[in-house]
Amino acid sequence: MNNQTDIILQTETLCKYYGSGDNLVKAVDHINLQIRQGEFVSIVGKSGSGKSTLLHMLGALDNPTSGKVFLDGENIASLKADALSTIRRRKIGFIFQSFNLIPALNIWENIVLPLGLDGKPLDEAFIEDIIATLGLAEKKRSLPNTLSGGQQQRCAIARAIAAKPSIILADEPTGNLDTKTGDEVMALLKTSAKKYGQTLVVITHNEEIAQMADRTIMLADGRIVSDGIPSVKNRETGEVTAHEQD
Amino acid sequence: MSKTNTISNLALQRLRYNKSRTLLTGIAILLTTMLLMAIGTVSVGIFNLNRQMASFTDYHAVFRDITPAQSAILRSHIQVEALTTAEVFADIENGKMNGALAYQEIVRDDRHTDEEGASPTLQVESGHYPEAEDEICSSPAFFRRVGAEPVIGGKATLSFRVDGKGKIQTKEFTISGLFPDEEVAEGLDDSRIMWSAQVSKVLLSQYEEAGLYQPKLSANLRVYGEDELTYDEMKERINAVAADIGLPEENVNLNTEYLRIMTDPGTETMMIAGVICLVVILFSALVIYSIYYVGVITDIQEIGKLKALGASRRQIAGMFYLQGAIVSAFSIPAGLLIGFLLPYFLFPLVLYATSTTALTLSYREAIDALNLHMFSLPVLFAVAAAVLITVCLSLQKPIRMAKRVSPVEAIRYQESTTDKKSRKGHHTVKVSTLTFANLTRNKRRTAVTILTMGLSCVLFICVSAVLSSVSAKDLARWNIAEGDFRISLDYSRNDKEYPENNLDSLVQKNYFNEAFLAQLSAIEGVKKIQPAHGIILSSSDTDYALYQNFDGEPIRSDLSYFTREDIPELNEYLIQGSIDYDRMTANREVLCTYEYSFTQNGLSIGDVLTLTLHDGDREIPFQTTLTALTQPETDFSILVMTEETWNELGLAYDPTTDIYLYVEDAQYDSVKEALKEIVSGNEHFTLYSMDEEMRISRASIALTIYPAYLLLALIAVIGFISLINTMITSIVTRKKELGILQAIGLSDRQLVNMLSGEGLVFTAGTLLISLTLGNLAGWLFYKWAKQAHFMGISRYHYPLWESIGLALVLLGGQLLITRFISRTMKKESLIERIRNQE
């Protein structure tokens, strides 16, 4: 299965447990998942359903209790810390709910930071292009705390895209933004990912965002309860669900 | 729960939560308390020691050269409380032994009179004080030295010269009494020990009647009023008593040390201790302040939340004070206890260590006999109060900052503190970019940290500059100016009975002749022989006081020379006149190197001196002008001319009085044995050896230097705590940020490099400050110490090892701490770190 060429990210019986005995919490429980190159996947679920934990393991931020995570065919669950940090800066772009820019660096520096850490030469035209796309051209020298939330998140998106990673993982990227700004940012994120051919995995509570995705995975109690193209909001429960794909 | 309870509970919880910060504050307070308490305790100890030591010699003044008639007036003087007279009757002539026969008498002691009003008599350990003409008493060591058996009734035959002049007499004495024994420190040359024995009044009278002895007494005197009068009033009273018997003031030697201690309790000790304490307090306040300051910056959000929940400014302040109080409640008592116990056990050890190297046992016995009181309740309270005030003061600024935190701002607070909106930045971002961005983000904190650490290091370098200049070797060099050994010619100037002992006769014998030097060179291990100190005797027919003794009889005095190389030193200590080598040579001028002699003998600049120089059996007339007064560290004759003038004298005899020998280290001991052998063959030679001089010097500096180094170590520890605090806070407070950096690809190694880089900047800044300011301050401190003749400091020794040590400890410590903290941090998963504070 993992030798299918267009599968970029895949998990096999991925588990993450906390505690033991009566206090055992199965945050992620036997998840098998495949994500294709260029796909836009949204992950939905209630608080505590295991969305973030799953995303962190997909992004090599956290180690699974058991199971495998294949990124570009390589099982990253077995890699050491240094190799993982290389993977993170080369293949994965992260976007956090709380932006998490480095306050001491200006916008430009924040964006080129992953490249600098990797010692890669700058593709300046590419970075300028991203910055222009995300509307940050005027703000390159500003410090993060002088920017609005939307601007900061756009900067975070630029940072995630700058190293041309295969995958962008976003954890509630619009959670700290008002609806209008959130929509704008999400649209930019989607456009950019498409433009640069990147796979996008987004955790969200926002139904509209979920609906923008090619595919929606729904989690409950650490397990996938549905995986498919996003449906319209369930009129009775108000929840976004996913149609089962075959 | 009441309001107060909530706040105290909060304070307590915060202390628990910020464990490492609490611990650091605790240690800083503990060390401060300990340091102050130790200083206080040692001061009390020194004060007590001085008082007890002073009581061994409890006289107020010595009246020198008084006649029996004057002594009789003193005996009945109304203001005299006690009077002990002593007269040196004769010099002992026994090879190289330095010794005197003396007579001592308690003339009067109103403090210890018996029922009939009679004064006590002098006590011996066994037997009785000499009464009969042939009786003698001294310590058993003395009798062993002169080859007699130290038993009561035993016989001792001694040769002596009455008054140090006249014919050598030999007499058999009977031992009538023994003093407590003295243990002579082993390996010390005879010339370094002063022996004495007591004889009877009857013997002295015999010689006096025969016209062979003119009694000149020295009187140890106590006057009334010790407990009521000030130092100056006591001095005035003593001088008045001297005037009453017609004694000139220069014959009065005040027992200054004793008088000061008795009339002005411990002012000096207190002043020194006070200054040190002040420095310690200032310095600790800075460290404690910086810990709290960084703490507040770190906790701005939390404080903001508390305010948002309704905590008043007073409650916030109260919470901080309470935190300080809780930590103090543990640290101060612990500090007081350690600060007392440490010197309580160490101080006597240091005293004892110095006493074992001292010349004789008597000092050691004195130490043993001491019952040192080192505990003082006022000191304890003062220290506790001082530390509490220090803590309060250090809290002021951080509390003001905390009070000013507005709830809204604080919750949103992202540490940036610069008002800057933008940053020029770098085109690409490397690990070093991150490092510098972090440092410049909060310039003030960076500056406070570097300054705190810098100041502690400045203090460290400054103190070590002085301590490293306190050198046993420099002290030893007073007696052996160069090389490892000195053979010195023992000469008299004015011996009429035995003129062959005078320098002008000795030079004719040419003891330091080629053959003798060859003999020295032949000793295996001797590298170099350096003759030195050309000295010639001078006399004058004019009535200059310099060339007359107290009785107005003419005497001869040393005359020597200086070289061009000595000019800087001579100029440095110039008091009057001017020194110009060429002018002095052209005009055959001399300068005076001893201020006391200059004033005592009524000399003045411009005096023309008509002298006769005694070059062996030749007499050279020498007319000269006195053109300068200086008082250099180096030992010169009272009057010196230039080297060229000296050479122009065309001396017929070799004026060498000293020979310095350089030897191979490995053969030091065998050379010493050989030299002892050679020197023992000539009664005019004295051998000084470096090992003995070093022992004596070490003993004299140990008492000061060890406690000072202990103090230095504690300063270093407090400074180091400040370093640890900075590193921990700077890393812990950025836990999340560092987590994010790692999430976007910063590897562990890059993280450690980044943090180490930050630490290195702190270290570099600190070193820069301490090596510039510290060396400057150290140099000034040294100049002061030299001026004040502190511990015989005479040369500046750059504290090289201390500086290197400091740099290494800072560098190593900082790297270790960084590694340690980043390792501890890794125990938490990346996710936990990123979520931290969210």
Image: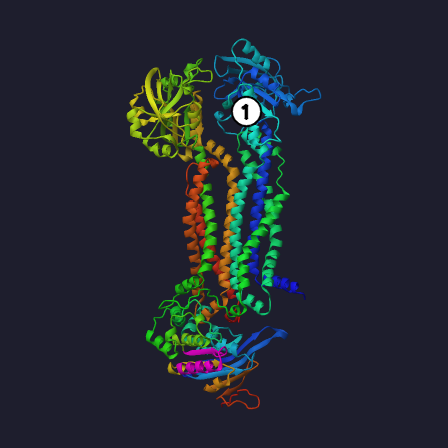
Q: Look at 31% across and 30% down and name the residue there.
A: B581
Query: Does the magenta-highlighted stretch encompass residue B709?
Result: no
When asked about the image quadrant of residue B482, the answer is top left
Tally the marks. Answer: 1
Where in the figure is residue B397, as x and y percent of width and height?
Answer: 53, 58
Q: Position of residue B239 (x, y in %)?
A: 54, 24
For the residue labelled by badge 1, is the local secondary structure a helix, a strand or a loop? helix
Relative to B437, A225 lies left or right: right
For the N terminus of chain B, the image quarter is: bottom right
Q: Position of residue B470 (x, y in %)?
A: 46, 38
Chain holding disc 1: B
Does the magenta segment cover residue A188? yes
Foreground pick, B631 / B175: B631
Q: Residues within 10 Å of mark 1 (few under 14, many from 20)?
A: some
When the figure is inspected, residue B216 is found, relative to residue B488, above or below; the finding is above
Give the residues in magenta: A166-192
- Can residue B524 be seen here? no
Residue on which disc 1 sits: B239
| Colour basis | rainbow
Depth check: B718 or A117 in front? B718
Q: Is residue A167 visible?
A: yes
Q: Is residue A20 above or below residue B349?
A: below
Query: Residue B58 placed where, x, y %?
Result: 59, 28
Quadrant for residue B87, please give it: top right
- From this view, report whether residue B15 is shown above or below residue B43: below
